[in-house]
Image (cartoon, coloured by chain):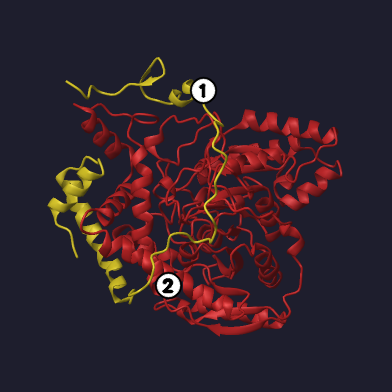
Chain colours: A red, B yellow
């Protein structure tokens, strides 16, 4: 059984196409490893075993009839932020208790249209607000990786922690995820998996619970680059239901993998050398630079002067948009309702009980920066700084840079319940220091496993591309995968 | 800029979040840490800079003005905590 779950999507596709295995067998193999592992890793909040079996059977029948989609018969995990018709969809929040939507998100519909099988819904930080998966109403997710010689449970990163851990521990062949400030790339880096946040507008946001609408984008987390390419091709689409969905055909990303990077210009931004960055991260970055040089790319030092302002800008813009988006959770149309003496009391008690601490904090920050008298000083100024952050990238790309190489995170995975992180919200927020700039500018970014630190934990390198240049990112990041190889956690769960 | 306890409570009221003194006090410390962190934006010269409106340059999409959806009241109220005959039920708002 476990042999089946060790197959990548591309390998499983080959065996399915050759008739060596069936989707039913593959799906049963995953259901059985989930059953054995979920109690310790806590990556799934719901396992949809019956549905998975039905979908797998239907896939095998389609295949017998000659219809083979891009993900035909492949069992996937779905982040709890995506609406799935008739199935638990709660953004891992108490306030959406028992919510089962009457509709399907565009991204998941695309996956089912291409033949994929749903194994269940994956754990995440509540409403995607967090960098450690500790804000989930369903409890923290464990990272399958542990420090050498230690039993201490580590976080998988967040907010797509359930997605990253499931993929790393082979509890699904691939997973959907979303990224508002680094929520695909940071957990991918912490678990030795590949995560790509496409350009804003590439994947439809329809049916994904909104956190910060100008920043949210869906993307895959997968075991390798090819699997990410296969999944993104299915997830991406032009969608009339999302007015920010862009009218561009979806290319065959897989075809870009293996193309030479000779002559490509890779930018190295000096501002990403932040104070207090561990030497290992710097060393890994240098190694990445050498890999590109050896592959024939041209290395160019560049400057993105407003980098340090991206994180403070994010902590104005994202909470502001969140406070507005989360106003809909009021105990009237769905989810939890607390009793109150009148309707306002009912709203206030429902929201105070239903939202966790981190979500309440962001709603308060957002409400404050949008409130009368503070709007110009905070929100308007942040939106102007955002223009400058975006302009930095535009300047670099106009100067001929094809992609920008940076570390993915300022550290490797930390312990669940880390006291410093818990005591200081800003310290937790700093996890996203290298990823958040990409969301601010709407660009595509990919995190690829690049090595292990001296504790034996995975680290990732990030490649940032031009708008809608996902193909170039797949082409260029292959250099990292080729040079670094793949990383698997030693099984203990 | 920093916030006092009264401001925390006022903002909580605006956000329709019930908050007791203990939670408000904890929140005050954390909000001030975050507001202190974002203060560095004041160093940036934003004179003459337009605020961002969209990260991707595109024209606003328009669609044909026609009915494409509807007639699904039962679906819309399906998840509500309290309903009656396809209406959402809430505590009495008019005396």
Position of A455 with respect to A77 (left or right) is: left
With respect to residue A227, does A383 lie above or below? below
Question: In front here: A349 or B70?
Answer: B70
Disc 1 crowd, CA 10 A, few/some/many (<14, 14-19, 20+): few
Q: Which residue is mark 1?
A: B71
Q: Residue at x 43, y 24 (%)?
A: B77
Q: Chain of mark 1?
A: B
Give the percent coordinates (x, y) of residue A339: 25, 26
Question: In front here: A146 or A341?
Answer: A341
Question: Contact, CB < 8 Å: mark 2 with mark 1?
Answer: no
Give the percent coordinates (x, y) of residue A200: 54, 57
* SS type, badge 2: helix
With respect to residue A397, does A204 lie above or below? above
Q: Residue at x 76, y 47 (%)?
A: A12
Picture disc at residue A230: none
Q: Which residue is mark 2?
A: A388
* Quarter of the image that includes the N terminus of chain A: top right
Disc 2 crowd, CA 10 A, few/some/many (<14, 14-19, 20+): many
Give the percent coordinates (x, y) of residue A462: 56, 68
Between disc 2 and disc 1, the foreground one is 1
Q: Chain of mark 2?
A: A
Residue B45 appears in the picture as rendered: yes
Question: In front here: B58 or B64?
Answer: B64
Give the percent coordinates (x, y) of residue A428: 37, 61
Question: In front here: A257 or A466?
Answer: A466
């Amino acid at each position: 059984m476990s042999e089946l779950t060790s197959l990548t999507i591309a390998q499983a596709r080959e065996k399915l196409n050759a008739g060596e295995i069936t989707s039913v067998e593959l799906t049963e193999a995953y259901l059985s490893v989930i059953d054995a592992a979920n109690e310790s890793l806590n990556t799934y909040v719901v396992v949809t075993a019956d549905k998975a079996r039905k979908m797998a059977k239907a896939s095998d029948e389609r295949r017998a009839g000659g219809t083979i989609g891009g993900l035909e018969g492949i069992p996937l995990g779905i982040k709890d932020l995506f609406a799935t018709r008739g199935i638990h969809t709660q953004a891992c929040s108490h306030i959406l208790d028992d919510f089962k939507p009457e509709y399907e998100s565009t991204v998941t519909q695309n996956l089912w249209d291409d033949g994929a099988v749903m194994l269940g819904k994956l754990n995440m930080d509540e409403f995607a607000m967090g960098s450690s998966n500790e804000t989930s109403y369903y409890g923290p997710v464990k990272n399958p990786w542990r420090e050498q010689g230690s039993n201490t449970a580590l976080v998988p990163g967040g907010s797509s922690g359930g997605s990253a851990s499931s993929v790393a521990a082979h509890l699904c062949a691939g997973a959907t995820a979303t990224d508002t400030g680094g929520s695909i790339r940071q957990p991918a880096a912490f678990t030795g998996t590949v995560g790509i946040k496409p350009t804003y507008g590439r994947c439809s946001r329809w049916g994904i619970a909104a956190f910060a609408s100008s920043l949210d984008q869906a993307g895959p987390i997968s075991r390798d680059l090819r699997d990410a390419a296969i999944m993104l091709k299915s997830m991406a689409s032009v969608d009339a239901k999302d007015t920010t969905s862009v009218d561009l055909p979806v290319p065959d990303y897989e075809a870009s993998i293996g193309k030479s990077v000779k002559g490509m210009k890779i930018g190295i931004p000096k501002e990403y050398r932040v104070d207090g960055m561990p030497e290992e991260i710097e060393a890994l970055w240098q190694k990445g630079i050498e890999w590109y040089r050896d592959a024939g790319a041209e290395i160019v030092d560049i400057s993105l002067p407003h980098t340090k302002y991206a994180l403070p800008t994010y902590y104005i813009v994202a909470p502001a948009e969140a406070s507005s988006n989360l106003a809909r959770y009021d105990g009237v149309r769905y989810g939890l309702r607390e009793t109150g003496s009148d309707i306002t009391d009912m709203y206030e008690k429902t929201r105070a009980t239903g939202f966790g601490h981190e979500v309440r904090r962001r709603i308060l920050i957002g409400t404050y920066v949008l409130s009368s008298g503070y709007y110009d000083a905070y929100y308007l100024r942040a939106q102007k700084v955002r223009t400058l952050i975006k302009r930095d990238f535009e300047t670099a790309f106009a100067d001929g840079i094809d992609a920008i190489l940076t570390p993915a995170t300022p550290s490797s995975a930390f312990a669940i319940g880390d006291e410093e992180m818990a005591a200081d919200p800003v310290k937790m927020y700093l996890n996203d220091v290298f990823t958040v700039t990409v969301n601010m500018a709407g660009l595509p970014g990919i995190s690829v496993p690049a090595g292990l630190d001296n504790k034996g934990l995975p680290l990732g390198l990030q490649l940032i591309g031009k708008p809608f240049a996902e193909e170039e990112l797949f082409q260029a990041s292959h250099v990292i995968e080729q040079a670094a190889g793949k990383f698997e956690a030693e099984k203990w769960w | 800029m920093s916030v006092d306890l009264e401001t925390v409570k006022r903002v909580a009221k605006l956000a329709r979040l019930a908050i007791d003194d203990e939670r408000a006090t904890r929140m005050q410390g954390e909000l001030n840490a975050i507001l202190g962190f974002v203060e560095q934006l004041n160093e940036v010269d934003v004179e003459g800079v337009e605020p961002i409106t969209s990260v991707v340059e595109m024209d606003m999409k328009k669609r044909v003005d026609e009915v494409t959806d509807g007639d699904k009241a039962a679906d819309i109220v399906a998840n509500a905590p309290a309903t009656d005959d396809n209406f959402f039920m809430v505590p009495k708002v008019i005396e």
